[in-house]
């Protein structure tokens, strides 16, 4: 019986899917398994899982397309699982809204730890600030895990949410790329620093009036990023 708060495993190789399933269940999670992209989307819409482990090379509908559609419909954390390890593939996955990336062959224990870490930081992000954060017509409500502009919701991926909450919580403070990366991932060994730039670019598309000339999330050349301080926020 499928239960609420399940993790969706999307993997066409049944022996790998079974290995992942056993490893996740051993930690007390409930699971749902799909062996192709079409079924994955159907199950995701039907059961609203709390996490998705997504293989990229899938029959019927590719993992890339599954990720794109899931991200249009929800902010569920997504960990991509693939045999490809090129930086371009990683960056493309993150640009679609993935939250982490594991390359085959992988350690089931490491995979589970990454899942737990992402779920933990997603939960902790909501506890980072109890008060509402505002900037002009933008309003972030951490307790509701919600961002709105003029009352209209702006959907964010878990990684985008963590980054924006971090930056908005300390206007004017400069965060290095490495520091922001550690806010996103328990270990950054397999994650390139440019991932932060990808997430920041997506955030700017969502909250800046002119993403090409941002006035909220500002680049500090050679260091990282900062959120505009109160004097700079007048035009927001």
Image (cartoon, helix red, strand yellow):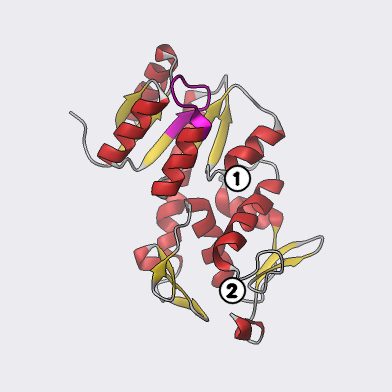
Callout 2: SS: loop
What is the crowding at mark 2: few (fewer than 14 residues within 10 Å), some, or many (at least 20)?
A: some
Please tell me whether mark 1 or mark 2 is closer to you in this view: 1
Residue at the image position 52 percent from the left and 81 percent from the top:
136
Pick the residue in front: 187 or 102: 102
State the CA–CA distance, disc 1 to disc 2: 25 Å
Callout 1: SS: helix
Q: Give residue 175's quadrant in the image.
A: bottom right
Image disc number at residue 170: 2
Residue for badge 1: 95
Residue at the image position 73 percent from the left and 65 percent from the top:
219
View extreme (left): residue: 1
Pick the residue in front: 217 or 68: 68
Quadrant where the image shows the N terminus: top left
Image position of 162 (left or right of 141): right
Pick the residue in front: 201 or 8: 201
Quadrant where the image shows the C terminus: bottom right
**Compared to 35, does 150 lie above or below?**
below
**Compared to 109, does 93 lie above or below?**
below
**Compared to 130, does 96 lie above or below?**
above
Percent position (x, y) of residue 157? 48, 52
Image position of 36 (left or right of 163): left
Percent position (x, y) of residue 193? 71, 47
Percent position (x, y) of residue 191? 65, 40
The magenta segment is 53-64
Residue 29, visible in the rendered structure: no
């Amino acid at each position: 019986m499928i239960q609420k708060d399940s993790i969706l495993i999307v993997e066409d190789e049944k022996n790998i899917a079974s290995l992942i399933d056993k490893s996740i269940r051993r930690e007390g999670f409930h699971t749902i398994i799909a062996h192709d992209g079409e079924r994955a989307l159907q199950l995701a819409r039907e059961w609203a899982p709390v996490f998705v482990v997504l293989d990229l090379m899938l029959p019927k509908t590719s993992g890339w397309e599954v990720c794109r559609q899931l991200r249009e419909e929800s902010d569920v954390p997504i960990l991509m699982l693939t045999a490809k390890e090129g930086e371009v593939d990683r960056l493309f996955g993150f640009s679609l809204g993935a939250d982490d990336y594991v390359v085959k062959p992988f350690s089931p224990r490491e995979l589970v730890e990454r899942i737990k870490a992402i779920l933990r930081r997603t939960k902790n992000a909501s506890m980072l600030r109890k008060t509402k954060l505002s900037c002009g017509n933008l309003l972030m409500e951490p307790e509701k895990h919600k961002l709105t502009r003029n009352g209209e919701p702006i959907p964010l991926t878990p990684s985008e949410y963590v980054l924006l909450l971090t930056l908005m919580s300390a206007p004017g403070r400069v965060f290095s790329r490495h520091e922001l990366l550690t806010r996103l991932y328990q270990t950054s060994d397999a994650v390139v620093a440019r991932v932060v730039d990808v997430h920041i670019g997506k955030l700017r598309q969502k909250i800046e009036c002119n993403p090409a000339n941002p006035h909220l999330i500002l680049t500090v050349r050679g260091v990282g990023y900062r959120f505009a301080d109160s004097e700079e926020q007048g035009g927001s």
